């Protein structure tokens, strides 16, 4: 295995070098939520329940599916989610 | 006073092997001697040596040729010689009849620590303490170019990953201290050291020999008169445009001829890009952040070109702005482009200047006044001015006269805001106007010229 590369920081170093996750939204109002089924057994049960709860709150939901949990999502699926939804909930395990 | 001799040798060098009797004589002289061998721990055979396996000692001693003999008094180096020159060795050691049976002179061999690629690798391994910037370790499988994108360091195009070796090599391009602060970069007003400029110059794709020019460009951008914060934050199209003058243009191979404002020349492309990356990374100035441009312009990736001084009858732009004759200099202008001035018919300066005036009349909005602009005069238009015997001043004066409109107190072109340069390919009666910002002069940006250092 190659050595872990080290880069020299080009920035003014006012922010941490560690990448921060995106901030969570204050509210789901007006935002479309993507539910991503990774094709693992019974993931749909969890996502169906979540879907109903979001429906009850009047939040728009769109459903997506990976063809297999064994691989990362196809680019087309990722691009579709990025184009159509503001947030994504992904069932990661059984 | 303590005298110490240090000797660096390698088996692979015939001169080094020839000098075995000399090494023995040095060891027998009573002077403290330490011997470093670069390739074979069993060499030399006449005296015990230490194996400089990682070449750290050779790197720190700055050895370039073997054998190298260094003399120190109380720890301070007082002299060194390399190769074999009996007289020099005798002078340095104070010993007589060294290598009496040997020829008086033999050239040395290249040291292992200066073989191709080694100086950069050794600098990264043993010299990286020079660098004060934070280090960003990547994950083992993380791609360096993608990592730069992920961390927001890129202008949208791939950047050269700023490894320690590359940054150290870049810093070799200047005599300035890496810790020297050039100024505060807007919008975050972060101190910009020579080192930070070097890191961003690496990412932009600069060679180390471009660095003095890049440093002058950054200094000009950070000059209060240039108003870099406003140039960044405005909703206008503009960005910094860099115009280079003097010997540096040819020294680093800039293109002042065909497609001068276009793509394809490394120095033109990367020097302008380095400034943009400094503003983005050191200053934190990013589009849709503090950069509020409504449209921007493609020159905000990079916009840097040299004047074609050799092809021009006029003195260099930099000299007309106060830089020393023959000095390398940069001029920064806050502008965008490229507005065409097409005239394939005029054969006199008087007719040609009317075409330039026509383009200015319709530029942006007919009511615009107090405009700053760069005019890039193409060779075939320059030929018309030259045939008519017009100086740069004659051209500007005639243009101002042509643009005079009764009833307007404010001139079309701001006094002091017009920069006229000569550049471009030999064929094509097409010049260009690079318009400036709406905020010109003391209320906005004033063009800044700086001489290039070392």
Image (cartoon, coloured by chain):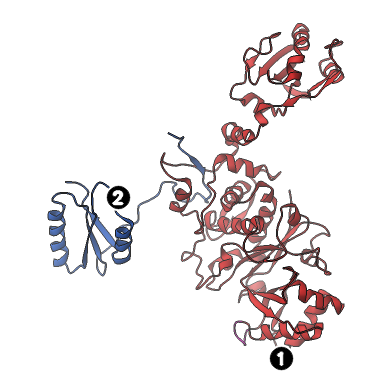
Which shade of the palette goes to chain A? blue
Asked if B212 appears above or below B372 in the picture, the reply is: above
Pick the quarter of the image with the N terminus of chain B.
top right
From the image, state the color of chain B.
red
Residue under label 2? A72
Q: Which residue is mark 1?
A: B405
Q: Is there one chain holding both mark 2 and mark 1?
A: no
List x then y, in percent, for residue B173: 68, 45
- Please determine whether, in this image, residue A91 is positioned above or below residue B263: above
Residue A82 percent location from the top left of the image: 32, 62
Which residue of the protein is positioned furthest toward the front in this rendering?
Answer: B427
Do we see residue B187 in this rendering? Answer: yes
x and y percent of residue B304 in the render?
A: 65, 62
Contact (CB < 8 A) between labels 2 and 1?
no
Secondary structure beneath disc 1? loop
Chain of the residue under the numbered disc 1 shown in the image: B
In magenta segment, residue B367: yes
**Secondary structure mostly seen in the magenta stretch:** loop
Answer left or right for B132 relative to B104: left
Q: Residue sitting at 69 percent across and 68 percent down?
A: B447
Image check: B122 left or right of B407? left
Question: Compared with residue B40, is residue B307 higher up or lower down, i.e. above or below?
Answer: below
Image side of residue A94 versus residue B52, left or right: left
Q: Residue at x 71, y 8 (%)?
A: B46
Q: Secondary structure at mark 2?
A: loop
The region drawn magenta spans B364-368
């Amino acid at each position: 295995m190659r050595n872990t590369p080290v880069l020299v920081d080009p920035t003014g170093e006012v922010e941490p070098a560690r990448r921060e996750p995106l901030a969570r939204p204050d509210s789901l109002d007006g935002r479309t939520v993507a539910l991503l089924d990774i094709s693992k057994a019974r993931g749909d049960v969890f996502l169906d329940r979540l879907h109903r709860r979001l429906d009850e709150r009047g939040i728009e939901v769109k459903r997506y599916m990976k063809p297999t949990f064994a691989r990362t999502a196809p680019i087309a699926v990722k691009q579709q989610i990025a184009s159509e939804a503001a947030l994504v909930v992904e069932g990661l395990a059984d | 006073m303590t005298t110490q001799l240090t000797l660096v040798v390698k088996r692979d060098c015939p001169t080094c092997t020839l000098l075995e009797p000399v090494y023995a004589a040095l060891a027998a002289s009573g002077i403290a001697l330490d011997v470093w061998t670069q390739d074979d721990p069993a060499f030399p055979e006449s005296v015990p040596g230490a194996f400089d396996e990682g070449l750290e000692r050779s790197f720190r001693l700055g050895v370039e040729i073997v054998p190298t003999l260094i003399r120190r008094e109380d720890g301070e180096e007082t002299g060194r010689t390399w190769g074999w020159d009996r007289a020099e060795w005798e002078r340095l050691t104070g010993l007589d009849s060294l290598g009496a049976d040997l020829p008086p002179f033999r050239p040395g061999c290249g040291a292992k620590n200066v073989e191709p690629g080694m100086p950069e690798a050794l600098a990264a391994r043993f010299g990286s303490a020079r660098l004060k910037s934070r280090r960003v370790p990547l994950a083992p499988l993380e791609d360096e170019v993608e990592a730069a994108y992920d961390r927001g360091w890129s202008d949208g195009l791939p950047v050269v990953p700023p490894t320690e070796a590359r940054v150290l090599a870049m810093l070799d391009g200047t005599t300035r201290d890496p810790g020297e602060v050039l100024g505060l970069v807007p919008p975050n007003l972060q101190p910009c050291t020579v080192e930070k400029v070097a890191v961003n110059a690496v990412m932009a794709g600069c060679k180390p020999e471009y660095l003095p020019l890049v440093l002058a460009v950054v200094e000009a951008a950070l000059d209060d008169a240039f108003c870099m914060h406003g140039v960044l934050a405005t909703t206008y199209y503009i960005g910094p445009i860099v115009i280079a003058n003097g010997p540096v243009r040819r020294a680093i191979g800039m293109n002042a001829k065909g497609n001068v404002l276009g793509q394809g020349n490394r120095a033109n492309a990367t020097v302008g890009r380095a400034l943009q990356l400094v503003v983005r990374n050191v200053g934190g100035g990013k589009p849709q952040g503090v950069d509020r441009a409504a449209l921007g312009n493609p020159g905000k990736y990079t916009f840097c070109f040299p004047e074609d001084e050799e092809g021009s009858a006029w003195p260099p732009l930099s000299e007309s702005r106060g830089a020393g004759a023959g000095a390398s200099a940069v001029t920064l202008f806050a502008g965008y482009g490229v507005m065409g001035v097409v005239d394939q018919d005029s054969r006199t300066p008087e007719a040609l200047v009317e075409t330039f005036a026509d383009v200015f009349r319709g530029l942006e909005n007919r009511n615009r006044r107090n405009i700053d602009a760069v005019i890039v005069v193409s060779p075939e238009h320059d030929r018309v001015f030259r045939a008519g015997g017009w100086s740069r001043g004659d051209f500007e004066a005639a243009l101002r006269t042509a643009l005079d409109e009764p009833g307007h107190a404010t001139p079309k072109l701001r006094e002091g805001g017009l920069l006229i340069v000569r550049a471009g390919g030999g064929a094509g009666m097409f010049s260009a106007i690079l318009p400036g910002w709406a905020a010109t002069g003391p209320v906005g940006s004033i063009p800044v010229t700086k001489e290039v250092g070392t």
